[in-house]
Amino acid sequence: MAKNLSGDLLVASANRLVDGLVVYLDDAGQWTPRLDRAALARDKGEGAFLLERARAEAFTVVDPFLVAVSEDEDGTIEPLSLREKIRAAGLTFDAIAAEAVRYA
Amino acid sequence: MPDTHFYRYDAYDRALVGERIAQFRDQVRRRIAGELTEEQFKPLRLTNGLYLQLHAYMLRIAIPYGTISARQLRKLAEIARKYDRGYGHFTTRQNLQLNWIRLEDAPDALAMLAEVDMHAMQTSGNVIRNVTADHFAGAAVDEIEDPRIWCEIVRQWSTLHPEFSFLPRKFKIAITGSPNDRVAVRVHDVGLRLWRNGQGEVGFEVIVGGGLGRTPLIGKTLREFLPKDELLAYLEATLRVYNRYGRRDNLYKARIKILVHEIGVEKMREEVEAEYAATRNSALKLAPETIEGIARQFAPPPLRAKRTRVPEVEALKLENRAFALWLKSNVAPHRVAGHAIVTASLKPAGAPPGDASAAQMEGVADIADAYSQGELRVSHEQNLVFPHVAIESLPAVWRALDALGFAEANVGKITDIIACPGLDYCALANARSIPVAQSISTHFASLARQHDIGDLKIKISGCINACGHHHVGHIGILGVDRNGVELYQISLGGDVDFGNTALGSILGPAVEADKVVEAVDALVATYLEARIDGERFVDTYRRLGAQPFKESVYGNS
């Protein structure tokens, strides 16, 4: 199976209320920071249902929304857009290099 | 060391900030408990400077007119270490942003800030934002009057101003007391420039309707000369006209610059003057004792004139090239003989522009205590400034800064880049800014080369909101998203120097991320080949026009 880049595959994401952490809705209706555990919608209909579920579980998160993802042959999912790749993986540079400078 | 040379909170200020924190603490509690929806809570957190970005909450802390004491900076470091990830980002509005604050910790962080008379109010929302000032204020040789006195007066007037708490859009004011513009006064909603008229009186030129963002415009003079004691009445009239006629139906047309552009500056002036005529002799007319009371708090530190030629400095200059270059680019003259203004570069080669770790902030605070009267400034160019350093202390300050990684001799040079946080942090951005700045900074790291190139300002924004001021960069770089690919649009010829304020012109089609350094290199090579004596990059561009620069990037086709 080739990598699915159709844009039909969707996961639900949000930011966690208490700390803003990026989270995804899993199959059990829990919010997890792990993208690999996110519930996957395979078409627009499933996506609409997933978003509805996410909104129903939004007590501990802020503004759920759908993220288009790709799926690899081994089932690995990855966001399609750069914005969502950065949300999933974190900063693209070493933010605390400066912290390496110690001052006594 | 006490904060003795700028405004100190009184009981009223402390009570106001304390009440605000107590309110916010309760609002956060109710939000987490589910008693407030996000729709209800969002405007409350924003008015306390708390944004929700891509990965986390971001707290934007106000540093009024960029003036901060060593004690305050140490507290910022403590907050960064305790409630964030041990670093912060100094911004183009002279503020500090902490990028990883937890919502539940935000009230405690604000309470710690209040311990040193600081807050985060009005760093967001459609209100009058933190007023910016010349970062050399109170020390500059060319200063007519200290602009911070007027910034503080404006701060007191505008903080929680009931009539201006729901403006059509955010409102940014900058004040300079010098003929050399270091605050970009013509690209603000209102820019105020202190100057002396033919009668020897000092007053304000009031400039209105400047701004960057989606629709960049250079401000126009609304009032050539405004007596100083009429400042608040005139500002109130201006804001009242904006509040009345500014558009609220379209987010992108809501800034005062659009109003001024649409009705014309003459009509704007007519409206403001009519409003002003009705209010000029109200309670807003500033009594001399009010002005003097504020001015006393900005009394200059008691610096004694000292020798200007110090043998140790001269010797080090001869034996150490890095120190000699640092003296040229990072040290400016001071109004008191034997003293200097020192800029600590927060742009070491390859680092995110404007970032400082908690350890670095503490180190800078120690230097300020030891050598600069315990005072610092934040520049809108995202550096930190020691305003009062004795020339004899320059070697010690340089060594201490070198140990912190902040002694890069690059102020005003090609690697002294302004960059917004971009897509790595910002929910509005379309493309990354910091990695682009890092690539350019690494490529041009050689200080000898930078000094050969001379003054060249690169400004990078990750979206059209232009937080990185790309419109006024000698080389401006704007990140755009084309079908999911980051591309960078290059513009040339922007400038904020007074009398030469200009918006850059787009050079040609946007280039891919990995071609930006190559393009900048080609632009610099074209300049170096064509410049005549004394010309900066932007001067050569003005003389020759865009064509040779365009050919260097895109070829002759």
Image (tube, coloured by chain):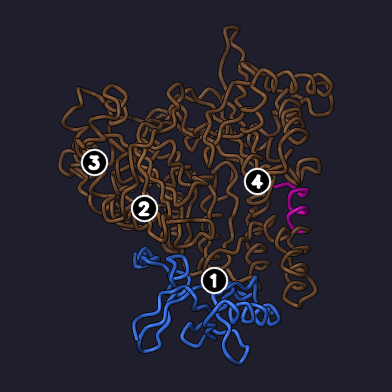
Distance Cα–Cα, label 2 vs label 4: 25 Å
| Residue A13: mark | none
Task: Mark 3: give few (<14), some (14-19) or many (20+) Cα within 10 Å.
Answer: many
| Residue B553: mark | 3
Residue B285 position (above or below residue B316): above
Nearest the eye: B539 or B308: B539
Q: Is residue B260 visible?
A: yes
Image hue for chain A? blue
Quickly name the residue at label 1.
B82
Q: Chain of mark 1?
A: B
Q: Is residue B375 visible?
A: no
Mark closer to the observer (3, 1):
3
Which amino acid, mark 2?
Answer: Leu
Left or right: where B485 falls relative to B224: left
Disc on the earlier residue, 3 or 2: 2
Nearest the eye: A61 or B321: A61
Tell me which segment is drawn in magenta.
B9-18
Q: Are marks 3 and 1 in contact (CB under 8 Å)?
A: no
Which amino acid, mark 4?
Answer: Leu
Q: Which chain gets the brown colouring? A: B
Q: Position of residue B536 (x, y in %)?
A: 28, 29
Mark closer to the observer (1, 4):
4
Disc on the earlier residue, 2 or 4: 4
Distance Cα–Cα, label 1 vs label 4: 37 Å
- Which residue sits at x=66%, y=82%? A53
Disc on the earlier residue, 1 or 4: 1
Quickly name the residue at label 4.
B251
Which amino acid, mark 3?
Answer: Val
Helix, strand or loop for disc 3: helix
Distance Cα–Cα, label 1 vs label 2: 37 Å
Disc on the earlier residue, 1 or 2: 1
